[in-house]
């Protein structure tokens, strides 16, 4: 089995977002970066599938030269090789991103054999576009199932389960090759070990410069949401606070006067 995982370099959650002076990009000088959480689970799922079924694995990302760090994080837990589609660091829209990925995947397959399974995260943590996996599948003419919370490989098929509204699961049996996007919670990603990080330093990272194909609306700029002021009122402590609580609930219309 030959598995490809596509990941995205995103700002670490909890960081303070600051815009550049022209308001066109996020100022990344003081931000930490990581793999998007859904895609961390996709990496873990790829490693588990290779451990169970044998085969080879590749991780691919589109981003700046610094995104090699995220590729090596994935390789530290068991992915064999990485492919960096190196950009100048500017954000690419979902159409341009999926086009570049599809072109790179076709080139990789022409050079080294077809992928049996393409794994993506359900959506990126920073933009939440929900589009790239579906667009890549369409470009490569492959079946696609998204939002997956359980995955098995049986007799040349991917058996994927997705949570259904009202409880329970929808089960999909998809012939390989296929594109699957997974959701956080499908597994618990392992942490890279020190020996794993040392091995990752020696693994291959192929660098490719993709051609941008911007399509659709153009970005004019970014704007941070206005901060909302909040306040806290202490009503008292112990039994003496009970009348104040009742008074507040009446004022909010939650209790009849």
Image: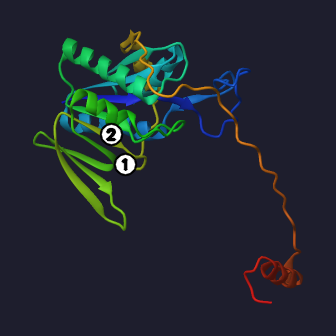
Please give left or right for residue 17 compared with residue 189 in the image.
right
Q: Which percent across, then down, holds residue 188?
A: 42, 46
Q: Which of the 4 image quadrants contains residue 121?
A: top left
- Residue at 82% of width from left, 52% of height from top? 229
Q: Which percent across, then down, holds residue 235?
A: 87, 73
Pick whichever of labels 2 and 1 is earlier in the sequence: 2
Which of the labelled discs sits on residue 144, or is there none? none
- Residue at 21% of width from left, 51% of height from top? 172
Q: Quick one: quadrant of the N terminus?
A: top left
Compared to residue 254, the image places residue 145 above or below, namely: above
Q: Are marks 2 and 1 in contact (CB under 8 Å)?
A: yes
Q: Secondary structure at mark 2?
A: helix
Q: Which residue is mark 2?
A: 45
- Binning the other alpha carbons within 10 Å of mark 2 as few (below 14), some (14 to 19) or many (20 upward) gives many
Q: Which residue is mark 1?
A: 186
Q: Quick one: quadrant of the C terminus?
A: bottom right
- Residue at 26% of width from left, 16% of height from top? 108
Residues 218 and 212: in front is 218
- Disc 2/disc 1 C-alpha distance (Å): 8 Å
Residues 178 and 152: in front is 178
Q: Secondary structure at mark 1?
A: loop
Q: Which of the 4 image quadrants contains residue 18?
A: top right
- Residue at 31% of width from left, 17% of height from top? 104
Residues 25 and 176: in front is 25
Compared to residue 218, the image places residue 231 above or below, namely: below
Is residue 47 visible in this depiction of the protein? no
């Amino acid at each position: 089995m030959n598995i490809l995982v596509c990941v995205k370099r995103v700002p670490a959650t909890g960081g303070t977002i600051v815009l550049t002076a022209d308001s066109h990009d996020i100022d990344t000088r003081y931000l930490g970066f990581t793999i998007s959480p859904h895609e961390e689970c996709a990496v873990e799922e790829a490693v588990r599938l290779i451990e169970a079924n044998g085969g080879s694995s590749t991780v691919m990302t589109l981003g700046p030269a610094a995104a090699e760090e995220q590729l090596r994080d994935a390789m530290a837990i068991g992915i064999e090789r990485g492919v960096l589609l190196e950009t100048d660091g500017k954000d690419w829209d979902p159409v341009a991103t999926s086009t570049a990925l599809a072109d790179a995947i076709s080139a990789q397959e022409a050079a080294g054999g077809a992928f049996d399974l393409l794994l993506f995260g359900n959506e990126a943590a920073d933009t939440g576009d929900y589009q790239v996996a579906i667009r890549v599948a369409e470009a490569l003419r492959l079946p696609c199932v998204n939002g997956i919370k359980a995955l098995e490989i049986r007799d040349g098929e991917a058996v994927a389960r997705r949570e259904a509204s009202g409880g329970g699961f929808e089960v999909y049996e998809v012939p390989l090759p296929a594109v699957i996007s997974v959701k956080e919670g499908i597994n618990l990603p392992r942490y890279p070990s020190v020996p794993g990080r040392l091995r990752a330093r020696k693994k291959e990272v192929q660098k490719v410069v993709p051609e941008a194909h911007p399509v659709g609306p153009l970005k004019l700029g970014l704007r941070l949401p206005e901060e909302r002021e909040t306040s806290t009122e202490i009503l008292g402590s112990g039994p003496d606070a009970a009348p104040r609580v009742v008074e507040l609930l009446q004022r909010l219309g939650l209790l009849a006067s």
